[in-house]
Image (cartoon, rainbow, N blue to C red):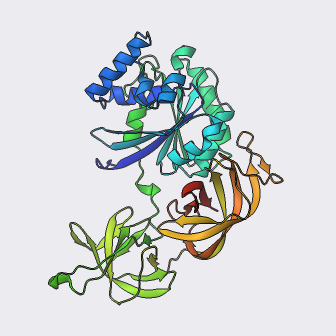
């Protein structure tokens, strides 16, 4: 299938400390000629000051001063680059357990995850933890990069053993598509260019794999969900009677003439027109930004959701979810929070903590009800008003939400609806 040259691929990187995530991204940017001259000059000077013979590629992503001093990644660093085939956004996320929240944040919108494994150490506890978070976030594609193959003499047997190790843990998680590539990020083997040191590897280099990854089928085309962002009322004479409802399609397809329902009110109407900046369309699909007009004059407000009449989300005030606690302060029981779901906000509270997940052993701790930063827990949430939701497994857009502390306006949790 031909790749859409304008198609954007978001991917995240994960791995243990010193597995080479930042070096890998630096190599991707450097070898694909996606680095500005002034950036390159700055990195060359810094590398020389550190007494290095070659470029320290990790400096392309380790932007924070603390990271550069410690030689580790402690925040989510976003990088953008383009090749003739595709546009990319990279989220370089931390490997440390104390930065679980950063990984959840960076990976939440990713189409793919690059998971690095040190060829010398194989699958370790952090590999399992990162894989679980990737499966929890329903990232459709996992590319396992077995890095530092130069330190194990590029042995095929080492790579095959790690592939076998990883496949055994992936089979126990909700991971749909797993691919493997042996690399040396430091030397560039199988990153952008095919490695001459591993002729036994018949697959594509990493960049080629990313350029040709098919992500069109990852979007939910079945369930039409359209959160209304704003109401358009032109005052010109030619458009005096026009009333449009604008926003971005979260999922599904809409066509002129379709019967739709507005939630939570339950009003029913028919799509009269679908408009964009470039004119009227017969149909539109996710993730397009459009304005819809109706054949009936009904009351629709920002935060309402337009759906197909015969395909509706669940409308509820109580639901179960997996939650990653992002707040610096521990959770206080019976605290009032603001739940932001799509464009809708409702007062909410965590009614019950079902269990806390031990992120290392992946065991459930049912007796521990204390929630602290980076904890992942299963909870029941109750809201003051109705929420129109889908399960996160079916729809990553309408199955996700955040919780906000109304006193500080801090985002304290990110959730995935079960």
Q: Position of residue 15 (x, y in %)?
A: 57, 33
Q: Position of residue 30 (x, y in %)?
A: 34, 26
Q: Quadrant of the C terminus?
A: bottom right
Q: Image check: 290 left or right of 227?
A: left
Q: Position of residue 373 (x, y in %)?
A: 66, 46
Residue at the extreme left: 237
How many circles with numbers are drawn on the protein?
Answer: 0
Asked if residue 262 can be seen in this view, the reply is: yes
- The residue depicted at 72 percent of the width and 65 percent of the height is 334
Residue at the extreme right: 367
Asked which quadrant contains residue 313, the reply is: bottom right
Residue at the extreme front: 407
Q: Image check: 15 left or right of 258?
A: right
Pick the front one: 242 or 115: 242
- The residue depicted at 46 percent of the width and 55 percent of the height is 218
Above/below status of 297 relative to 230:
below
Above/below status of 135 relative to 167:
below
Q: Image check: 331 left or right of 180?
A: right
Pick the front one: 374 or 20: 374
Asked if residue 190 can be seen in this view, the reply is: no
Asked which quadrant contains residue 285, the reply is: bottom left
Q: Position of residue 172 (x, y in %)?
A: 68, 46
- The residue depicted at 40 percent of the width and 55 percent of the height is 216
Q: Image check: 234 left or right of 161?
A: left
Above/below status of 346 relative to 18:
below
Asked which quadrant contains residue 18, the reply is: top right
């Amino acid at each position: 299938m031909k790749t859409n040259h304008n198609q954007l691929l978001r991917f995240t990187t994960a791995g243990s400390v010193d597995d080479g995530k930042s070096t890998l991204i630096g190599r991707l940017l450097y070898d694909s000629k996606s680095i500005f001259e002034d950036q390159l000059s700055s990195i060359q000077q810094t590398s020389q000051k550190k007494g290095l013979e070659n470029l320290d590629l990790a400096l392309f992503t380790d932007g924070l001063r603390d990271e550069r001093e410690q030689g580790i990644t402690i925040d989510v660093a976003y990088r953008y680059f383009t090749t003739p085939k595709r546009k990319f956004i990279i989220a370089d996320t931390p490997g440390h357990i104390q930065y679980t929240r950063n990984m959840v944040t960076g990976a939440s919108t990713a189409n793919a995850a690059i998971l690095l494994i040190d060829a010398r150490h194989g699958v370790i506890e952090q590999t399992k933890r990162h894989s679980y978070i990737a499966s929890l976030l329903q990232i459709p594609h996992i590319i396992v990069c077995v890095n530092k193959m130069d330190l194990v003499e590029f042995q095929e047997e080492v790579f095959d053993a790690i592939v076998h190790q990883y496949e055994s843990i992936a089979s126990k998680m909700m991971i749909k598509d797993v691919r493997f590539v042996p690399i040396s990020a430091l030397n560039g083997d199988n990153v952008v260019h095919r490695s001459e040191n591993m002729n036994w590897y018949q697959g594509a280099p990493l960049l080629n794999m990313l350029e040709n990854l098919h992500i069109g089928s990852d979007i939910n085309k079945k369930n039409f969900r359209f959160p209304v962002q704003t109401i358009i009322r032109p005052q010109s004479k030619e458009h005096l009677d026009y009333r449009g409802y604008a926003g971005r399609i979260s999922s599904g397809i809409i066509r002129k003439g379709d019967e739709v329902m507005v939630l939570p009110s339950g009003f029913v109407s028919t799509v009269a027109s679908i408009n964009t900046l470039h004119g009227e369309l017969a149909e539109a699909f996710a993730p397009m930004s459009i304005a819809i007009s109706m054949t009936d004059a009904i009351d629709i407000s920002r935060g309402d959701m337009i759906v197909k009449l015969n395909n509706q989300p669940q409308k509820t005030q109580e639901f179960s979810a997996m939650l990653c606690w992002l707040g610096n302060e521990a959770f206080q029981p019976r605290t009032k929070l603001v739940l932001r779901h799509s464009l809708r906000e409702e007062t909410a509270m965590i009614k019950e903590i079902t269990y806390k997940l031990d992120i290392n052993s992946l065991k459930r701790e049912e007796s521990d009800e204390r929630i602290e930063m980076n904890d992942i827990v299963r909870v029941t949430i109750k809201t003051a008003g109705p929420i129109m939701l889908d399960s996160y497994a079916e729809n990553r857009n309408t199955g996700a939400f955040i919780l906000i502390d109304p006193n500080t306006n801090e985002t304290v949790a990110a959730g995935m609806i079960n």
